[in-house]
Image: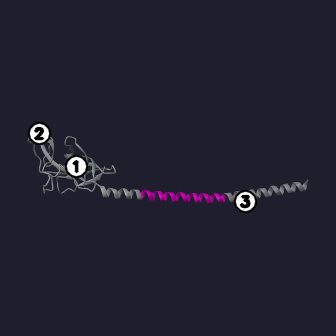
Amino acid sequence: MLAAALVTAAATVGLALLAYKQMGAAEVQMRGTRAQSDAAIAIAKEQAAAALQLARETREAAERQWQPRVFVHGKDEPTVGDGNDAAPDEMAVAYYLSNEGTGPAFNVEHGIEIAGKTYTWNDWQWGSMRAGEFIPQLDAGSTQPVPSSAIVVGVKLSEWVEGEDRVYWSRFENLLGDRYEVRNYADAARATEFRRL
C-alpha cells in the first residue's frame, strides 16, 4: 500500500511538473503569437497609410489636370443706369466671366461685392462652363480678347459707396465636387484670391 501511495505521489508530482512545463511553453507560444499579431497590425497600418497617401496624391493630380478657375472681370467703369443697362436710380456695374483653368466648372455663381454687401445678376447660376469659355461669349470672328457685351448688375445709388473697392467674385465646383471661390479686385494692386470653400 505504501508503495502504491509512493507511486501515486511520484506520478502526481510528475504530472504537476509536466503541466507546469506545458503552461510555460504555452505562454511562450502566446507571446510569440502576440508579437506576430502586433507586427501584422503594424504592417496593416503602414499599408493603409500608404494607400491613403496614394489616393491623396492621385486626387491632387486630377485636380491639377482638371482644375477650373472662373474669374469675374470688371468691364469699363460703373456708370449711372440709363434704363437699358440698369435703372436710373442705380449704378450699372458691368463684368464678364472667363474660365481660365484646365477643366470645366459646374454650378457657377457670380456677382460683385461693394462695402461688404453682395449683389448678383438675377441670382443667376450657370450649370457649367468649359475651360477657355467666356460668358457672355466672345464675338464670332473678333480678334478682341474680351466679349463686347457684358453682364450688368444694378446697385442702388443710395447703397453705392464712391471710392469703395469692388470685388468681383465667383463660386464654382470642379469635377470632383470640390467648391472654390475666386475674388478678383477692381483695385489692380490687390492680388486675386483663389480658395477652396
Of the residues under marks 1 and 3, which one precedes in the sequence?
3
Name the residue type under label 1: Trp
- The total number of labels drawn is 3
Distance of label 2 from label 1 (alpha carbons): 23 Å
- Amino acid type, residue under disc 2 in the picture: Ala
Rendering quarter of residue 118: top left
Any magenta on residue 133?
no
Q: Which residue lies furthest to the right in this view?
A: 1
Could you tell me which secondary element the residue under label 1 belongs to?
Answer: strand
CB-based contact (under 8 Å), mark 1 and mark 3: no
Q: Mark 2 points at which residue?
A: 87
Mark 2 crowd level (few <14, some 14–19, many ≥20, 10 Å Cα) = some
Q: Position of residue 110 (x, y in %)?
A: 22, 46
Left or right: 86 in relation to 4: left
Callout 1: 10 Å neighbours few (<14), some, many (20+)?
Answer: many
What's the distance in space between the residues labelled 2 and 3, CA to CA? 99 Å
Label 1 or label 3, whichever lies nearer to me, is: 1
Q: Name the residue under label 3.
A: 21
Which quarter of the picture shows residue 124?
A: top left
Determine the CA span between mark 1 and mark 3. 78 Å
State the extent of the magenta-drawn residues as a range: 27-53
Which residue is at a point 69% across and 59% down the rendered structure image?
24
Based on the picture, tell me whether residue 38 belongs to the magenta stretch. yes
* Residue 169: mark in rendering: 1
User: Are the residues at dot 2 and dot 1 in contact (C-beta closer than 8 Å)?
Assistant: no
